[in-house]
Amino acid sequence: MLGIYNYTVILTYIGFLSGFAGILCAFGGHLTAAVLCLVGAGVCDVFDGKVASTKKDRTRSEKRFGIQIDSLSDLVCFGVLPAVIVYSLGGSWVRALACGAYVLCALIRLAWFNVDEEARQDFDTGRRKVYLGLPVTSAAAIFPLLIGIGRLRHWPLHIMGPLTLLIVAAAFLTPFSIRKPSLSVRRKPKLRGSRRLRRKERKKNDANA
């Protein structure tokens, strides 16, 4: 069979299916379910790279496949799905143009990222530490927050949705630096000589006693 099916890409496949399910939910009028699918796809994206990096003997083809399949999944989950969610708030030709512009900007950014990431991995095998522009995956946080808070505060989401799409789309292609968040937990460094100090304090207390 063509493709790769080991554990390094399983979360990417699950995330894609979550995004596809969200599109179906949005078309069916189930907005809450669509937003939850978007969040689920975001959770999968957070951990898929971490899981893939645990396989130290990945071939060059496996690494390149991972880059491509991740971006294709991201286009569906964080490009098409948010646009469909916003469009489902009330269709109009203006909203349709905003949704189209958003998906196009997501497509351009992901294509540029693939080229840049392959070039980076030719000389650097470590994990990326800095992004240029707003990552497409940020949609998994931005739009659920917009929909959730907007419903609670009774915001005009049929207006704010398309405006947010355009602002986020512009941020996708704006070359500002943003540091990639890390999931690793830093351990507190041990102070040198701490054992020696404790011994001195213990001896001092014994002498006073």
Image (spheres, rainbow, N blue to C red):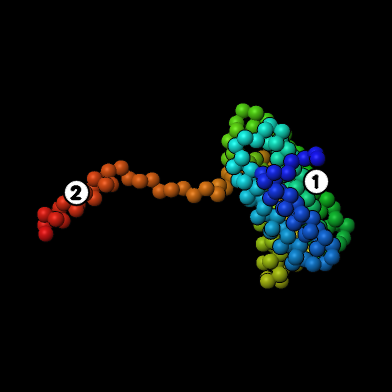
Looking at the figure, which quarter contains the N terminus?
top right
Which residue does the image show at 61% across and 28% down from the upper left? 123
Q: Does 121 sit left or right of 72 as displayed? A: left
Q: Does 162 sit left or right of 186 as displayed? A: right
Q: Does 152 sit left or right of 206 as displayed? A: right
Residue 116 shows in the view: no
Q: Determine the secondary structure under disc 2.
A: helix
**Which one is earlier in the sequence, the residue at label 1 or at label 2?**
1
Q: Residues within 10 Å of mark 1 (few under 14, many from 20)?
A: some
**Residue identifier under label 2:** 200
Residue in the foreground of this view, choosing between 54 and 27 = 54
Alpha carbon of mark 1 to alpha carbon of mark 2: how far?
67 Å
Q: Does 207 sit left or right of 68 as displayed? A: left
**Residue identifier under label 1:** 104
Residue 22, image x and y in percent?
Answer: 78, 59
Q: Determine the secondary structure under disc 1.
A: helix
Residue 21, image x and y in percent?
Answer: 79, 59
